[in-house]
Image (cartoon, rainbow, N blue to C red):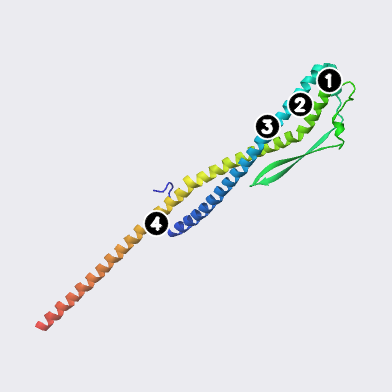
Amino acid sequence: MPSTTINPTRMELTRLKGRLKTAQRGHKLLKDKRDELMKQFMDVVRENRALRRRVEEALIRAHGSFTVASALMSPEMLEQALMCPKQSVELDMTFENVMSVDVPRYEFRTKQDDPAQIYPYGFAQTSGELDDAVSEMASVFQDMLKLAQIEKTSQLLAEEIEKTRRRVNALEYVKIPQMQENIKYITMKLDENERANTIRLMKVKDMILKEALEEKRAETAKAAGMSAN
């Protein structure tokens, strides 16, 4: 039985068949989109894993260098050396459409191209380990930015995959079976009505034939009585 009250008419049947065809086509497109999103997501996850490992290793090296530098230099000297940075950066964010998902794209650039500008201090009163730490942090910054971009992309793709999966399941297990059940119900009702009309027509035909036969018999009997007289 249908889940909702519907009119078992041919017009409703035609409308439901059209909706079913559209739903089945949409179901296929959504499944294709889900599969492609999964492929894109897995590629991003693999890239994220490799990049995160590289960033973590670079940060460990930078932290080790800072630890050694802080052991060789007094806290006041270390703070004074890093107090006034020379280099500054600009960050631009744009968006790229990936399977109808707007994912961020970060672009990082320094205001000065001279690599030596990353050191905001003179080299006479500082340790070489501090130079290594600053250099390591400067080199890992691009990877950290790329990692943030990839992780945000993977989050947005995961959310879109989940939404697409729910839509696919709603069509596959609820909407399409419901429309198929309604079409089956209307078809059955129309067949029943057609059979009932056929039976009524047969009964009417039998009644007409019976009346015609009785009229013929009456005419025959009347003719026979007239002949006897």
Q: Is residue 6 visible?
A: no
Quarter containing the C terminus: bottom left
User: Which amino acid is tagged 1?
Assistant: Leu
State the residue at coordinates (78%, 23%). Answer: 65
User: Which amino acid is tagged 3?
Assistant: Arg
Q: In the visual, does 99 lie left or right of 229? A: right
Q: Looking at the picture, does residue 84 appear above or below residue 146?
A: above
SS category of the residue bearing label 2: helix
Q: Position of residue 179 (x, y in %)?
A: 46, 51
Q: Position of residue 148 (x, y in %)?
A: 70, 35
The 10 Å Cα crowd at callout 2, few under 14, some 14 to 19, many 20 or more, is: many
SS category of the residue bearing label 3: helix
Per the model, the C-alpha gap separating discs 2 and 3 is 14 Å
Q: Position of residue 11 (x, y in %)?
A: 46, 59
Per the model, the C-alpha gap separating discs 3 and 1 is 29 Å
Question: Which residue is under mark 4?
Answer: 187
Mark 3 near mark 1, Cβ–Cβ under 8 Å?
Answer: no
Q: Sequence order check: which comes first, mark 2 or mark 3?
A: 3
Question: Which residue is under mark 1?
Answer: 78
Q: In the visual, does 166 lie left or right of 140? A: left
Question: Which residue is under mark 3?
Answer: 53
- The answer to which of 191 and 223 lies nearer the viewer is 191
